[in-house]
Image (tube, grey):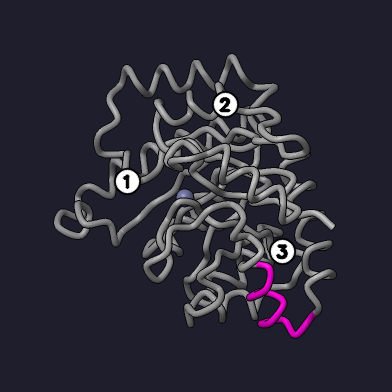
Amino acid sequence: MVLIDTHAHLEEIKDLDEALSKARSVEVVAVITMGSDYRSSLWAIRNCGEHVSGLRVYPALGVHPWSAGSLNTEEMNALLELMHENVENFVAVGEVGLDYWYKEVRRDPGKRGAQKAIFKEMLRVAVEYGKPVSVHSRGAWRDCLNIVAESGVESAIFHWFSGSLEVLKEIIDRGYLISATPAAAYSREHRLAIESTPLENIVLETDSPVTYRGETAEPAHVTRTLRAVAQIKGLDEASVEDRTTKNARNIFRI
Ligand SMILES: [Zn+2]
């Protein structure tokens, strides 16, 4: 039995070796680390590979919607070059998307434009290189889905999906996936989404080192995600682990 944490921000974890050793001890064999801007994407490329014996880190490259407002042209060009040079190495475009609940965007909805422009550019790259995307869609679920569908991207994971069932149905119909996080233990919206999604369309993650109910997440906590999904689905953990790990291997081709 093996687990894959499909979405983490490893560059933000304080004692990474310790966290990855702990993850390995609970059967985690792979972690996909997300890029949020040029700097963290570069970190992802430089730090991919086998960290502790039997656990590999795979890089995803992208611009998080929270970084969209501050990314300058130079950084964008550097990121595009990084993607071009490492086309064989990176496994996904992410974390990309829209966040209409982000404080700057709530204050000034005009800032949605910058998020959309960068998101579309990242999706263009995903199509060009045939990569899956990890999509952040908080408060912007419908627009995210429409933009992804229009872009022609074939494989997408709507990360930590907590939007409406109407959008979710379309995500599933289009063959896209959602990811479950440790919030599956308590978030009503997230639990409902997991309940309403076939296991074939779910992967597991932690979004480390985000804070869940006062506790900082680490990749080992993907076991908590597993436990919550098994409980929601009324299935044993082994079958959820088996299926979701297969889904992750398929979409990231790892
Ligand atoms: Zn994230």
Q: Is residue 119 visible?
A: no
In this rendering, which labeled residue sits more in front, label 2 or label 3?
2
Q: Please state the horizontal and vertical placement of residue 83, each as a whole percent of the image.
A: 55, 22
Q: Please state the horizontal and vertical placement of residue 70, each as a whole percent of the image.
A: 25, 34
Instruction: Say if the magenta span includes residue 227.
Output: yes
Q: Residue at x 62, y 68 (%)?
A: 224
What is the secondary structure assignment of the residue under circle 3?
helix
Q: Looking at the rendering, in which quadrant would you find the C terminus?
A: top right
What is the secondary structure assignment of the residue under circle 2?
loop
Using the image, tell me which numbered label, if any, was put on residue 47: 2
Q: CA distance from mark 3 to mark 1?
A: 26 Å
Range covered by the magenta-colored residues:
226-235
Q: Please state the horizontal and vertical placement of residue 35, each as a whole percent of the image.
A: 48, 36
Left or right of residue 214, residue 152 in this image: right
Q: CA distance from mark 2 to mark 3?
A: 29 Å
Pointer 1 local density, CA inside 10 Å: few below 14, some 14–19, many at least 20: many
Amino acid under disc 3: Asn
Label 1 belongs to which residue? Answer: 66
Query: In the rendered structure, which disc, 1 or 2, sits on the residue that comes first in sequence?
Result: 2
Label 3 belongs to which residue? Answer: 201
